[in-house]
């Protein structure tokens, strides 16, 4: 175990969060029960906000950024885990209140970890990461609501070429739903078609304010954009349909009316990945192991070194990242 290792820390600089690579030691880590050697982390939208300093993600400083971890247990004071176990961690306040994954070693709580599913390598698990696991939570929520299974009408995915969107398309298509992708990047149509999208909507058509009850089109939707887009999607959802909302890439507001809900029984299903209970997480990861084929996963993924995180953070916030970015820790 090397004495010092590199971590991407968010520190206070004149009252503002600022990211910098620092050398730290095991003794600097929080006193949690399981020491994990991190092999890979990922880049999610929230990581972009944290690393660029454009969002106040860390609620205490200094903070190691990175909301995802895939690695191997080195030491454990908990009976639940032993040295050599391969583990995955998504969320649980990492990068907000707890030190995160952009570091060679991290100490974490035993109850935050799930066992790496047999279907995946550590790198695969981070190709999925929080974005992919959130996409699975969204599909779980839509299926639990019940109406998309019975309905042959289209299921819409917004923010389609992003991390959540790409994975949601692959998962929905694998289950046989007719998937329409809303994207602002026509150059990604071939990529999205390979993942299973069969029709496209220009995202600009959803970002202008429309009427409260528009023509019914979507049996269901996975929305990672929020704001006017989500309001329009709700207004275009069929009677009894549901929208799983998990993101705010287009804004945190929701300029909508109650009309789709009270006149069409449309459900707005909120999806949070950070504090989701273990049973939901395990179900989502089972779906990913069953329905996400390896070819789709590798087509949405690129691997980047930790040293590129500052540039990559700006890219994801500018909507320039396609699919998922795995961060190789080292
Ligand atoms: P990405 O940046 O990979 O994807 C977001 C996509 O949204 C972009 O690729 C783009 O898609 C679209 N988009 C970006 N800006 C706008 C805009 N101004 N108007 C309309 N569409 C836009 O991010 P992730 O997939 O990692 O995350 C997506 C969202 O989900 C984020 O808001 C993130 O915070 C949230 N999230 C929430 C979680 C939860 O627990 N609730 C967990 C994970 C993510 P395109 O280029 O195709 O148009």
Image (cartoon, grey):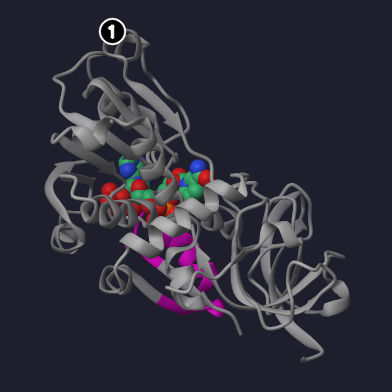
Is residue 317 something one can see in this rendering?
Answer: no
Please name whichever residue, 31 or 306, is drawn nearer the observer in this view of the structure. Answer: 31
Element under disc 1: helix
Q: Is 150 situated left or right of 267 in this image? A: left
Outermost bottom residue: 2
Q: Is 99 situated left or right of 312 in this image? A: right
Query: Does residue 164 lie above or below 312 as drawn?
Result: above
Q: Is residue 312 magenta?
A: yes
The number of numbered discs placed on residues in the rendered structure image is 1
Q: Does the magenta stretch include residue 85?
A: no
Q: Give the range drawn in magenta.
A: 303-324
* Quadrant showing the C terminus: bottom right
| Residue 41 rendering spot, x and y as whole percentages | 55, 70
Q: Is 99 situated left or right of 29 in this image? A: left
Query: Does residue 79 lie above or below 111 as drawn?
Result: below
Residue on which disc 1 sits: 263
Is residue 198 something one can see in this rendering?
Answer: yes
| Residue 1 rendering spot, x and y as whole percentages | 77, 91
Please name whichever residue, 167 or 313, is drawn nearer the observer in this view of the structure. Answer: 167
| Residue 321 rendering spot, x and y as whole percentages | 36, 62
Residue at 23%, 48% in the rendered image:
184
Residue at 18%, 17% in the rendered image:
214
Q: Is 207 situated left or right of 22 in this image? A: left
Q: Which quadrant holds residue 315?
A: bottom left
| Residue 35 rendering spot, x and y as whole percentages | 77, 74
Q: Which quadrant holds residue 71?
A: bottom right
């Amino acid at each position: 175990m090397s004495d010092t290792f590199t971590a991407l820390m968010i520190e206070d600089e004149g009252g503002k969060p600022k990211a910098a690579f620092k050398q730290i030691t095991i003794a600097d880590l929080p006193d949690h029960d399981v020491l994990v050697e991190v092999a890979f982390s990922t880049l999610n939208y929230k990581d972009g906000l944290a690393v660029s300093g454009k969002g106040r993600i860390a609620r205490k400083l200094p903070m190691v950024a990175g909301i995802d971890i895939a690695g191997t247990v080195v030491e454990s004071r908990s009976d639940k885990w032993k040295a050599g176990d391969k583990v995955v961690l998504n969320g649980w306040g990492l990068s907000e209140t707890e030190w995160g994954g952009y570091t060679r070693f991290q100490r974490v709580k035993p109850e935050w970890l799930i066992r790496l599913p047999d279907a995946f390598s550590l790198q695969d698990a981070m190709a999925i990461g929080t974005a992919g696991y959130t996409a699975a939570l969204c599909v779980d929520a839509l299926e639990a609501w019940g109406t998309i299974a019975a309905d042959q009408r289209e299921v819409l995915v917004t923010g389609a070429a992003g991390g959540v969107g790409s994975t949601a398309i692959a998962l929905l298509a694998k289950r046989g739903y007719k998937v329409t992708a809303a994207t602002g990047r026509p150059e990604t149509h071939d990529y999205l078609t390979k993942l299973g999208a069969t029709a496209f909507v220009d995202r600009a058509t959803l970002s202008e304010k429309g009427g409260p009850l528009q023509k019914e089109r979507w049996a269901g939707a996975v929305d990672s954009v929020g704001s006017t887009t989500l309001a329009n999607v709700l207004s275009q959802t069929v009677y009894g349909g549901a929208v799983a909302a998990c993101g705010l890439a287009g804004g945190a507001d929701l300029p909508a009316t109650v009309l789709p809900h009270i006149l069409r029984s449309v459900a707005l299903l909120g999806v949070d990945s950070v504090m989701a209970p273990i049973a939901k997480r395990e179900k989502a990861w089972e779906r990913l192991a069953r329905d996400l084929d390896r070819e789709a996963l590798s087509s949405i993924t690129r691997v980047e070194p930790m040293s590129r995180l500052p540039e990559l953070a700006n890219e994801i916030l500018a909507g320039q990242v396609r699919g998922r970015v795995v961060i190789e820790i080292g």
